[in-house]
Image (cartoon, grey):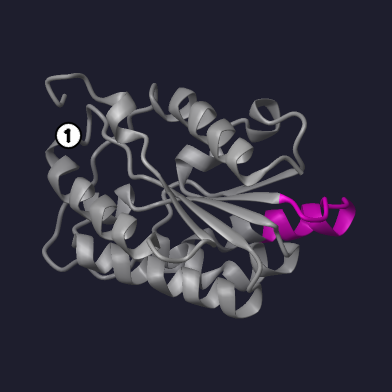
């Protein structure tokens, strides 16, 4: 496995390419929106489990988990020299990743987790504070089971079709960035400045 600094640089560069050209449709916004039913992803999770029963997964892998920006990212192509596992499922919230983590996160015992979720949450009406709390839950449960695993949070990306939500997304990013400080196992990878122009758009 390459050094921590190397994989952080590689993930940042590849994520900018992967997310910079993708814009997802805005969802309806509702005040204090509850988490959607995670069972809507049960078939997708069963597909992952069926694949795992027939195939070996790498040890000490880099696990990519989260929403469509992970699912549609050709991670094996972006990182041909690293052992990667992609468990993105489109449309997911952080709460969905928490719900299914005992099936698609913990069993792989990854050395590194690259996590992207949160923009679906904000677009559906969740507050930045709620996004932070859900991510804290994901981190807590991961580190309780896998205390040596590193977790890299890819910042929620600005996009044209969800531009109206950017102030809230930016606030969520800042809350999560502050949360990651002080723990060497946690990393915040900020892709926003690279995707935004000098005018902030």
The residue singled out by tag 1 in the image is 163
Q: Which residues are magenta?
A: 46-61
Between 145 and 126, the one lying in front of the other is: 145
Judge left or right: residue 162 versus residue 104: left
Residue 56 horizontal/vertical position (percent): 88, 52
Q: Residue 31, percent across and down?
A: 11, 64
In the rendered image, residue 113, in percent from the top left (x then y), is placed at 59, 54
Question: Does 187 sit left or right of 199 as displayed?
Answer: right
Q: Is residue 23 visible?
A: yes
Residue at 25% over, 59% down:
175
What residue is rendered at 47% in x and 66% in y? 183
Q: Secondary structure at mark 1?
A: helix
Tell me the quarter of the image containing the C terminus: top left
Which image quadrant is residue 121 in?
bottom left
Residue 180 occupies quadrant: bottom left
Mark 1 packing: few (<14 Cα in 10 Å), some, or many (20+)? some
Given residues 14 and 92, the one toward you in this image is 14
What's the residue at 24%, 25% (across, down)? 196
Any magenta on residue 38? no
Give the residue at x 25% y 68%: 130
Can residue 39 be seen in the rendering of this structure?
A: no
């Amino acid at each position: 496995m390459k050094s921590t600094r190397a994989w952080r640089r590689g993930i940042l560069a590849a994520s900018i390419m992967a997310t910079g050209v993708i814009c997802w449709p805005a969802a309806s916004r509702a005040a204090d929106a509850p988490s959607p039913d995670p069972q809507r992803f049960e078939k997708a999770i069963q597909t992952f489990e069926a694949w795992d029963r027939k195939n070996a997964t790498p040890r000490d892998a880099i696990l990519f988990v989260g929403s469509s920006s992970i699912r549609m990212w050709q991670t094996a192509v972006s990182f041909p020299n690293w052992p990667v596992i992609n468990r993105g499922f489109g449309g997911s919230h952080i709460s969905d990743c928490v719900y299914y983590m005992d099936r698609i996160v913990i069993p792989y015992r990854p050395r590194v987790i690259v996590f992207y979720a949160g923009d679906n949450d904000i677009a559906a009406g969740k507050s930045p504070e709620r996004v932070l709390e859900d991510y804290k839950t994901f981190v807590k449960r991961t580190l309780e089971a896998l205390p040596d695993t590193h977790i890299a949070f890819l910042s929620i990306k600005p996009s044209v079709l969800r531009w109206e939500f950017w102030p809230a997304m930016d606030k969520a990013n800042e809350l999560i960035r502050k949360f990651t400080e002080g723990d060497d196992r946690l990393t915040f990878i900020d892709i926003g400045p690279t995707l935004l122009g000098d005018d902030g758009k």
